[in-house]
Image (cartoon, rainbow, N blue to C red):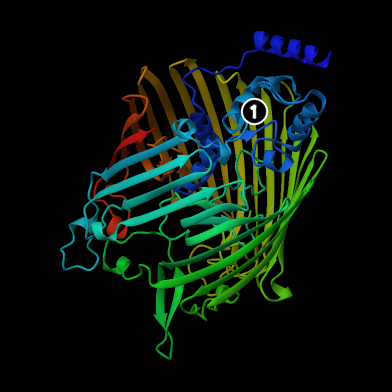
Amino acid sequence: MRSANRALIICLYLLMGPMAVTAQDSELEIAKETLEKYVENTESNSDYTDLSEQLEYLVRHPINLNMAVQEELSRISQLTPEHIQALLLHRQLYGKLTSIYELQVIAGFEPDFILTIKPYINILENLELSDLNYQSFRKNYHHEVAYLSQRRLEKSVGYKLPDSDRNAFRGSPYRHVVRYKASMGKNLSFGFNTEKDDGENLRNSFFSSYLQFLSTGKIRQLLIGDFQAAFGQGLCFGSGLTFGKSAFVLDVMRRQNGLRPNRAMNENEFLRGGGFIYKISAGIHLTAFYSLKKIDATTSEDSMNESRFTGLLNTGNYRNLPELSKKGILKRRIAGSNIEFKSGKLQIGLTMVHTKYGSEQSLDEKKSYQLYNNHVSAIQNYGTDYKLFHKNLLFFGEAAMNQDLKSFSFINGVIASLDKNFDISLLYRNYSMYYIPSITNAFGETQDNHNEKGLYMACSFTPIKNYKLNAYADIYHFNWLRYQVDAPSRGSDMMLELQFTKRRLFSWYVRYRNEQKQKNEAGTQIINRLELNRRQLLRFHLEIKINTSMTLKSRIEHVWYQRQFGKTLNGMLMLQDLQVQVFKNVKLLSRLMFFDVEDYNSRVYAFENDVMYSFSVPAFQNRGTRFYLLVKYKMNKNIHLCFRFARTSYENTESSGSGQDKINSNKTTDTSIQLLWAL
């Protein structure tokens, strides 16, 4: 009887409320849209390839809704504890799902929401090693090779200097990138990346590769080459990029746990060596890894003429002699292990990591903020993390320390579904100023997870159909001095966003953000006093899908930057995007933007569409216009060609950039061409 009722309900939903998705909407495109929503709130032009790969991995290896337990389902950031509990209860009452569209009969799984998570889920059985044969190889084998060439047409000062000048760029102004990756289902994958940055000589090109094997036996994973490793909440150890504060206000729990191949082009922030995951028993897994890599650093000599490093560099640029002198001069060894226990709704992890540098760090005694920074050549980090599911609650956290209790640091959080229309998250972190991190990516206002206390509170509320209200407040405090902050300081970050979405055809949102931080008062002072700097942002964003082939996006944004003892500075942008499917195999994406920004502090950011595996979030100041055109040509089902042209024109300045990157023109023009072959 239950089966008959369920079948009737499913049929009614499929007939009366079909999901608004067109045939041309690919799962990877939906995943890319999700990444854009994360990145659009960021204020840095980083290489987000690592985050893109994490989402793409879920697309390539979707979670089986008929087999997944709570912990596996929690890897999909959009699923709240309410969603997970409702799905598990539905499975218990009615058995396995017969179709993804059956989710529509479960409370909280609206059609638009299902479309959002659809790339990451299925109801099929996973491929096992015993299933491998020629037919399965042809079906599951996938490879992809991409070549990218980029150039800024206007030459900067570094290209015009004579060869005898040590600051002169030694290479051509072209950037060349080759990416290759191949996979056999979820069991075997390998790939490599190579990059020559603009201004670099070809012999200084970057090369990265990996080989990964997954199985259902005792050795669950074997990874050799360049990789990332992250455990728990990333407080004891976590490499690679993670999502920070964004419009997805509930997504504050770190979901990566273990090893993954490195696909990003950052030339310093990854591990080089190997690691494995070993299944000790049904609920116990051991992960071990080792890395030996030379990284970029600045150095100095002490009174004993011994060389010490003064800081780590992550630019990855080796265009002239000063930059080349810092390349790979510091050796870093990292050895670590993690043991994970899973039992029912509880997961516990224990992590230990040893980091050894080739020399000790030299700290400037005149810079008081460096008093508690790393000044030893060897670091020991110990940590324990947990996740606990209880009804509609998900608890998570981690504690970490070095060798002494003074360095004890921790982070604890909870994500709760109080109602099908109301979810909240709370997170408290306390990172000791005595804690010396190795590589971390835990949630926080700063990236080093050191000398910080904070409380983050967020909620997501659906008051009526099609409307959603997202809000967060983050209040934090620094117990010790920081760079350009000569006293203990405090700050806050608050965001309020109202969204309206109707069947993916029409949507808009209004966002207000208010950030306050204490910094040294501007100007030269005998004794620097702190002043409260406030940055406010107001944005209105509108998106209209005219038809299956045309989409319009519009945005107006205003930024106010106010110093406590200074004047208010303003920044403004207006942009119009047009996306058109001209022919079946040609898509155009364009933007026209106007900006008027008084000062760097009131700068504005805008995420831009780019070629595959390239991400652009430029910052704008001064006054001018920005235009770009991205052409995607699908030559056939396997070969894609992309071309991008972007130009910024300034009205109130005749140059841009500084130092060797200065361009003596009021225009900057960037071009890109990419050829992608996927099979």
Q: Is residue 483 above or below residue 544?
A: below
Q: Is residue 533 above or below residue 495?
A: below
Using the rendered image of the protein, determine whether residue 105 is visible from the camera's viewpoint. yes
Look at 49% across and 77% down and name the residue there: 361
Report which quarter residue 487 is drawn in. Answer: bottom right
Q: Quadrant of the N terminus?
A: top right
Q: Quadrant of the C terminus?
A: top left
Q: How many marks?
A: 1
The image shows residue 96 at horizontal and vertical percentages of 73, 26
The image shows residue 92 at horizontal and vertical percentages of 81, 29
Left or right, residue 32 beside residue 385: left
Residue that lies at the very extreme toward the bottom in this rendered image: 304
Q: Is residue 595 above or below residue 474?
A: above
The image shows residue 538 at horizontal and vertical percentages of 57, 37
Residue at numbered disc 1: 123
Amino acid tagged 1? Ile
In front of the other: 6 or 303: 6
Q: Secondary structure at mark 1?
A: loop
Left or right, residue 607 beside residue 110: left
Look at 40% across and 67% down and name the residue there: 296
Look at 53% across and 33% down and name the residue there: 31
Q: Callout 1: few (<14), some (14-19), or many (20+) C-alpha neighbours within 10 Å?
A: some
In front of the other: 178 or 566: 178
In front of the other: 471 or 236: 236
The image shows residue 533 at horizontal and vertical percentages of 58, 55
Left or right, residue 393 beside residue 664: right
Look at 37% across and 17% down and name the residue there: 584
Using the rendered image of the protein, determine whether residue 431 is visible from the camera's viewpoint. no
